[in-house]
Amino acid sequence: MGLSIRAYARHRGVSDAAVRKAIAAGRITPNADGTLDPAQADAQWSRNTETPRVGSRTPAARAPVPTDAAPGADAGAALPAGGASLLQARTVNEVLKAKIKKLELEKRTQQSVDRASAIAHVFHLARVERDAWLNWPARVSAQLASQLGTDGHALHVALEAAVRAHLLELGEIRPKVD
């Protein structure tokens, strides 16, 4: 009769989860009744388990840390499903802090633009250009009519209709500001 898994874990100085993991991995084999012979299990444990090496973990063995994610993006989405180690969580936190500081620096050095003010400025420029085009037929129709020898009012009406049709075509264009 051997020891239970918990008793063997206390004997070995490890958690019972570690013993269950060793059994599941086939590093140690229990008796037919589910108990463990301490001498046999100790021999199998030392023979089939690698000793942990200090500092052997390389950054490649860890989950990749997002370096190009947007500051508002969910940084936890890149972490493994089982959760993150403290080091991984700190690394993600530091990357996000660096991105926020970079954005603040770009704003201070005027290398980035406030999106709302840029959209308002573009809207204002488009409105000014539209108004200039709508006023153009009234300014040039009399001069063109005298040069061409035609009726000034008829030319003004024709030019205004052509400009309005052209502006309607341009109004269908939707710029992307993403």
Image (cartoon, rainbow, N blue to C red):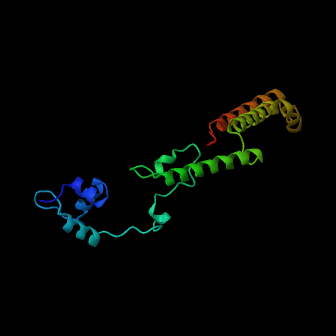
Foreground of the two, 112 or 13: 13
The location of residue 97, given as percent across then percent down, is 62, 48
Q: Is residue 61 above or below residue 17?
A: below
Q: Residue at x 55, y 53 (%)?
A: 91
Q: Is residue 15 left or right of residue 26?
A: right
Q: Residue at x 69, y 37 (%)?
A: 119
Foreground of the two, 52 or 4: 4
The location of residue 40, given as percent across then percent down, is 19, 68
Foreground of the two, 137 or 131: 131
Residue at the outermost bottom position: 47
Q: Is residue 28 left or right of residue 87?
A: left
* Quarter placement of the C terminus: top right
The location of residue 9, given as percent across then percent down, is 27, 57
The location of residue 174, given as percent across then percent down, is 62, 39
- Quarter assignment of residue 31: bottom left
Q: Residue at x 21, y 55 (%)?
A: 5
Foreground of the two, 153 or 24: 24
Q: Is residue 21 left or right of residue 71?
A: left
Residue at the outermost front position: 11
